[in-house]
Amino acid sequence: MRDDDAVLEILVIAAVTGALIMAVVLAWLVRAYLALKNDFRVLSDSIGSSHHDLAGLCSAALAVDRRLDMTDEQLQRLWAKLSELPDYGFNEQADHPYRSVIQKVRSGASVAELMQSSGLSHDEAALLVRLHGAKASS
């Protein structure tokens, strides 16, 4: 009978050990579940906040779009009014005396060429070359 008692004792120890292992695994699973549930809540809150921010940005974009449309309409009306104004004989050359000189500079004219062809002083020609020359536009 001792063998039966020993087998029974081993079975009880195995059952208790198995129960303890299952309890530890169950505790670990509960802990992992709670951590995942907390992570889900944090992510859900973050998505909700992002959704709210996105809705605000869309609303702002629509407002900006409406303002741009209004500005475009105003510009079109202003251009129409400007085109209706009389010319009074003014041309662009009279409004911009340096226009032809600037065109020469953009075409590659040097300071000496500007001084000779346009009657500019050295300082004026050098300034125009510096401001409107090929190196200034890059």
Image (spheres, grey):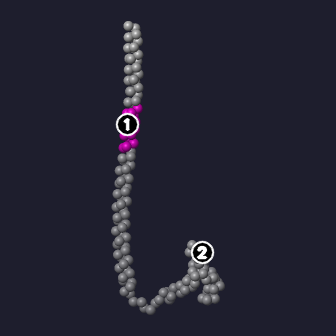
Alpha carbons under labels 1 and 2: distance apart = 66 Å
Q: Is residue 30 above or below residue 95?
A: above
* Residue 98 visible in image: no
**Residue 58 tag number:** none
Query: Mark 1 — residue?
Result: 33
Q: Quadrant of the C terminus?
A: bottom right
Tell me if mark 2 has few (under 14), some (14-19) or many (20+) residues whose alpha carbon lies within 10 angstroms of its own: few
Tag 2 secondary structure: helix
Q: Which span of residues is magenta-colored?
A: 28-41
The furthest residue to the top: 1
Tell me if mark 1 has few (under 14), some (14-19) or many (20+) residues whose alpha carbon lies within 10 angstroms of its own: few
Q: Position of residue 136 (x, y in %)?
A: 58, 75
Q: Is residue 109 above or below residue 137?
A: below
* Disc 1 + disc 2, Cβ < 8 Å: no
In the image, 24 versus 11, the foreground residue is 11
Q: Position of residue 88 (x, y in %)?
A: 42, 91
Q: Quadrant of the N terminus?
A: top left
Q: Is residue 13 above or below residue 107?
A: above
Tag 1 secondary structure: helix
Query: Mark 2 — residue?
Result: 135
Please name the predominant secondary structure of the magenta segment in the image: helix
User: Residue, x 38% and y 14% (percent of image)?
Assistant: 8
